[in-house]
Image: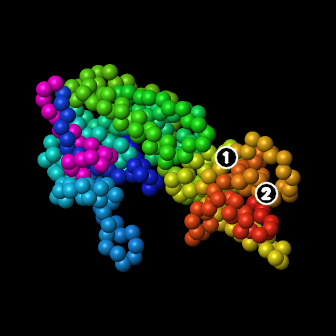
Amino acid sequence: MPRCSQPLPCRFFCCAATSAAAGTKKKNVVFLGSPQVAAVVTRPPATKNRGRKPMPSAVAQFALDRGFPGDLIFTPERAGEESFLSDLKEVRPELCITAAYGNVLPQRFLDIPPCGTVNIYPSLLPLYRGAAPVQRALLDGVAETGVSLAYTVRALDAGPVIASEKFPVDDCIKALDLLDILFNIGSKLLLDELLSVLDGSAKQKAKPQDDSKATLAPKMNLDESWLTFDEEAKVLHNKVRAFAGWPRTRAKLQLMNQNGEPDVLDIKVISTKVSTSCNKIGDENQILFSGNSLLVPCSGSTWLEVMELQLPGKKVTTARNFWNGLRGQKLLKST
C-alpha cells in the first residue's frame, strides 16, 4: 500500500469523482492524489503555529481556492472511518487511483470501486516496497529506477503490475526532483492504461509480482540523517540526495576558536558532490576550501565537496559565503 512518510509534496490524499469514457458509457473515477478533483479527501486541518487557527492541508486549500464545494472536501483521520466510507460510496466510484497516500487502505475501501484501485508507485515493483521507495533507491545509489502502475491489494505494494517504465538516475538528482519526474511518468502511464482498466482488460494482462525479488523501503528516520565522515564520500553524497526533502542531512563540525578550543557547529548539508580530484594537503580531520566548495576528507582517501549548507536558525547559504564568514578560523570534521 502506498505510503509517504516524510513531508514531501505528494503526501496528501485527495479523492476525485470524474467521468471517463469506456466505450459509450461514462464511469466515475475517484482519484487519490490529484488537485483536479470533484471530491477531495485529505488530512484534517492542523495548527501550524501556536495560537493560530487550524489551517487546511495544501490539497484542501488548492480545492477551496478554485471554488471547490467545501462539503465535498473530506478530512478523515483514517480511510477506514465509517462516515468516510459512507461518503465515498455516495460518490459511486467505478475506479480509485492512488498516488502516495500516507495510510493503509482497508479492504472495505478496496471493495467499493468495481474496477478496483490502481496505484501509481515510484519504483520498479517488486523493488522498494514501502514508505520511502525514492529515498531508499537514492540511498543505495541506483543507476536506474522507474514507476509502476499496479492494482492495490491488502499486502504491502504487492498487487499485479499493469505497466511500468524505467528511468535512468544520474548522480546529482535529489529525492524531491526524482519523485516529481516519476509521478509525471506515472500519470502518462495511467492515461495510456485508463480505458483498459475501466473495461477490465488490464486485469487480464497485469503481471503478478515475484515476491522472491521484493526489497523493502522502510520509513526514513531522523537518526539516519547524520553524516559520519568515516564513510566514503559517495555514500555520504547519496545520503544527502536521499534526505533532501526531509529531514535533510546533518553533520557536526568543529570550529577552532581564538583560544585554540573547538566549538561544535551543527549544520545541515544541502548540496554536495564527490570530488574527482583533490590535491589539497591538510590535517586528516581538517576541512579545506577550493573553488566554491568545502572539501571534507572521508574514508578511503575520498573527499566530499559541500556546496550549500545551513546553520541553525539561518537560511541556506553557499559554501563560499560560509567560508568567508569564518575569517580564517580553522574548521575540522568531528571525530
Classify mark 1: residues with Cα within 10 Å, few (<14), some (14-19) or many (20+): many
Cβ–Cβ under 8 Å for marks 2 and 1: no
Classify mark 2: residues with Cα within 10 Å, few (<14), some (14-19) or many (20+): some
Q: Residue at x 56, y 43 (%)?
A: 173
In the rendered structure, find residue 68 and report the number of the disc placed on it.
Answer: none
Q: Residue at x 27, y 46 (%)?
A: 36
Indicate whether 270 appears above or below 21: below
In the rendered structure, find residue 273 and report the number of the disc placed on it.
Answer: 1
Q: Name the residue carrying label 2.
A: 288
Q: Indicate left or right for 210 with 61 as reference.
A: right
What quarter of the picture does the C terminus occupy? Answer: bottom right
Is residue 135 highlighted in magenta? no
Amino acid bearing label 1? Lys
- Residue 47, position as x, y percentages in the image: 35, 70
Q: Secondary structure at mark 1?
A: strand
- Residue 304, position as x, y percentages in the image: 72, 49
Dot placed on the residue nearer the N-terminal end, 2 or 1: 1
Is residue 39 highlighted in magenta? yes
- Residue 326, position as x, y percentages in the image: 74, 68
Q: Secondary structure at mark 2?
A: strand
Indicate whether 270 appears above or below 322: above
Give, as a single range, the part of the protein colored magenta.
Answer: 23-40
Q: Residue at x 75, y 41 (%)?
A: 276
Amino acid bearing label 2? Leu
Q: Residue at x 73, y 63 (%)?
A: 323
- Residue 133, position as x, y percentages in the image: 48, 42
- Residue in front for this viewpoint, 320 or 84: 320
Residue 300 picture quarter: top right
